[in-house]
């Protein structure tokens, strides 16, 4: 399995973009899976697996509930 990919994708008339098979395989994206779209006018567009992002968000909220005391 390769760890990098470069290619193109066309936007269809309904605004849909097909994620190339090589990329779906690389990130184990399955049909019906929810993806999170992050966009910044200067940075561009990022597509993240929703489950991975939710796991990250849960860790952030958990850390805020139990902040570590400053060492010193």
Image: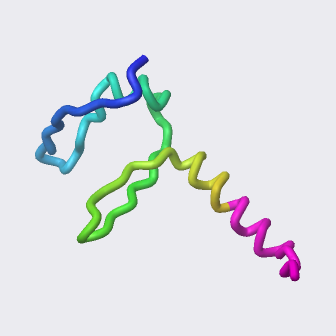
Q: Residue at x 77, y 74 (%)?
A: 64
Identify the coloring: rainbow
Q: Quadrant of the N terminus?
A: top left
Q: Residue at x 11, y 46 (%)?
A: 13
In x, y percent, where is residue 18?
A: 26, 35
Is residue 15 magenta-colored? Answer: no
The answer to whether residue 16 is above or below residue 27 is below
Residue placed furthest toward the top: 1
The answer to whether residue 45 is above or below residue 63 is above
- Compared across the picture, whether 64 is left or right of 16 comes to right
In x, y percent, where is residue 44?
A: 26, 60
From the viewer's side, name the closer residue of 62 and 31. Answer: 62
The answer to whether residue 18 is above or below residue 45 is above
| Residues shaded magenta | 58-72
In x, y percent, where is residue 71?
A: 87, 78
Q: Quadrant of the C terminus?
A: bottom right
From the viewer's side, name the closer residue of 17 and 14. Answer: 17
The answer to whether residue 61 is above or below residue 34 is below
In x, y percent, where is residue 17?
A: 23, 41
- Compared across the picture, whether 11 is left or right of 29 comes to left
- Compared across the picture, whether 52 is left or right of 5 comes to right
Residue placed furthest toward the front: 72
Count every numbered label the image shows and give the total.
0
Is residue 67 magenta-colored? Answer: yes
Q: Residue at x 45, y 47 (%)?
A: 35
Q: Residue at x 42, y 23 (%)?
A: 25
């Amino acid at each position: 399995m390769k760890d990098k990919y470069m290619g193109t994708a066309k936007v269809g008339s309904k605004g849909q973009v097909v994620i190339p098979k090589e990329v779906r395989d690389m990130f184990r994206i399955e049909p019906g899976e929810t993806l999170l779209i992050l966009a910044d006018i200067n940075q561009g567009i990022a597509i993240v697996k929703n489950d991975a992002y939710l796991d990250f968000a849960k860790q952030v909220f958990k850390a805020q509930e139990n902040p570590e005391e400053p060492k010193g």
